[in-house]
Image: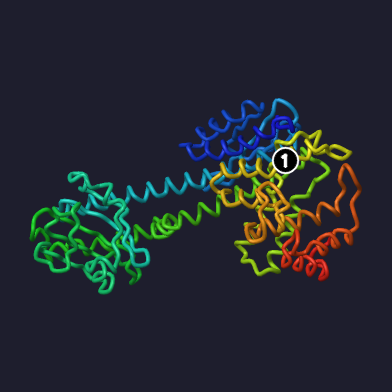
Amino acid sequence: MVNKENILKYFDLLLKIKEATKRSENLEDCINRINNELRPFKLNIYYHPSPKYANSENEFSKLIQTSEKPLTIIIKGEEKLTNLDISLFEIIYLEIKEFLKDLETKNKKENIRKILEKILEEIEKVVNYTSANIGILYEDKIKFLAFRGYEKYNVEEFIKTLELTEKDFYTIKTVISTKSPLLIENTDEYPNWVYIPETSWIKSHLIIPIIYNNKLIGIIGLDSNKPYAFTQEDIEKLSFMIPIIGLAIENAKLYEQLEKELEEKTIEEKRARSSLYQVIKVSAELVELKDPYTSGHQKRVAKISSVIGKILGFSQERIRFLNICALLHDIGKLAIPSEILNKPGPLSPLEKRLVNTHTEIGYNILKRINILGEVAPVVYQHHERLNGSGYPLGLKNGEILIEARIIAVADVVEAMTSHRPYRPALPLEVAIDEIKNNRGILYDPDVVSALLYAIDKGRIRL
């Protein structure tokens, strides 16, 4: 059970769950790894291979629609599930969903490779070769997806990572531009042959374009360790196979799969972003659990900061980054005792110093997470002030990141106009006077102007 006594362990748990899914080989392995991490919290995840409604005080379920059939992911607690348990389950659900997508894509790719390898076996029955490959065209590059024979020369790994471009390989340029086979009877005598140490044993070479719907989608490459190994007759023998190969590639959606593979980094970033927002959402809820008087504070600061960023001309990507920073700006309060955060009276000097450490604690938490590494410095600096009177570093003016300067103003205005255990909410006019009177002293003047403009135009309501 997740509660406010073990929330720091809970944050670590989120990271461990993400790592567990990355290392998993199949769904059962994924569930087992997650449960190993959940055991100390008296929680358990299991799945049912069909739609199943399992919502009760100590169970909660969600349906995942896979390409084959739907299945239900269920979380069960030894005690009554809390809202944070449900939030945790939402993250686990997303992680399992993306894991299953990745697994499905991986299996498709393996099936495609097996089809292409089988094609290379069939080609060898028609034309004798030393090694062969099938590559697919992506923009101006040929990327190899299936190979045979290269293991004899211990260059299989090299071929797997080799990409041939029109710019660097005249042979590829010729085949792409003409859509015709290219026969190189003797590589030693071919003036445009590119010498590569790993393939120096190739003495003759044949490239046949794979055409589908009058479009070149890939190539078949045949190599021999003997000169004059291939002839025009070999091209004719293989010509009848090309439409079949092209159709097989299209039917297997190979082209689409390769595009996904080449854009893998972008896809991973999008998936990480989706999962990241869930982690951020739960992290904000954790802080609010410790400090109920500031419930919604981080979200409101994020909203105000985003509006300021838009007025200042930030790009959408930068506004997204600013929003993440604002949502996590008080995460360091996870380590501050609730008794101090919720104290109804003034804090002692020692208690103030302890609360002020939340910026450094937040920095140390976030810098451990690769995808949040750039967020950490902003969180570290959001209590700095232009004249150097802030903390923890006493930075001045341009030494302070612009995102931190924005959050500083949004934080002050939101905090002043919200209820606190030691005072009621202050009128908006008081908060406006604070930032006006200290514009250019404590607070960035452009940021203050942007916020005042947003309030005047009704884009922010406090």
- Give the image location of residue 15, x and y in percent: 58, 39
**Dot 1 amino acid type:** Lys
Q: Is residue 10 left or right of residue 355?
A: left
Q: Residue at x 46, y 54 (%)?
A: 264
Q: Which image quarter: residue 367?
A: top right
Q: Residue at x 79, y 54 (%)?
A: 412
Near-viewer residue (96 or 69): 96
Q: Quadrant of the C terminus?
A: bottom right
Q: Residue at x 79, y 70 (%)?
A: 453
Q: Is residue 314 left or right of residue 178?
A: right
- Give the image location of residue 384, x and y in percent: 70, 53
Q: Quadrant of the N terminus?
A: top right
Q: Mark 1: which secondary structure? A: helix
Near-viewer residue (420 or 196): 420
Q: Is residue 442 left or right of residue 100?
A: right
Q: Which residue is mark 1?
A: 333
Q: Which image quarter: residue 135?
A: bottom left
Q: Residue at x 28, y 74 (%)?
A: 177
Near-viewer residue (257 or 407): 407
Q: Residue furthest bottom?
A: 178
- Give the image location of residue 344, x and y in percent: 88, 38
Q: Is residue 266 above or below residue 180?
A: above
- Give the image location of residue 341, x and y in percent: 80, 38
Is disc 1 surrounded by few (<14), some (14 to 19) or many (20+) residues within 10 Å? many
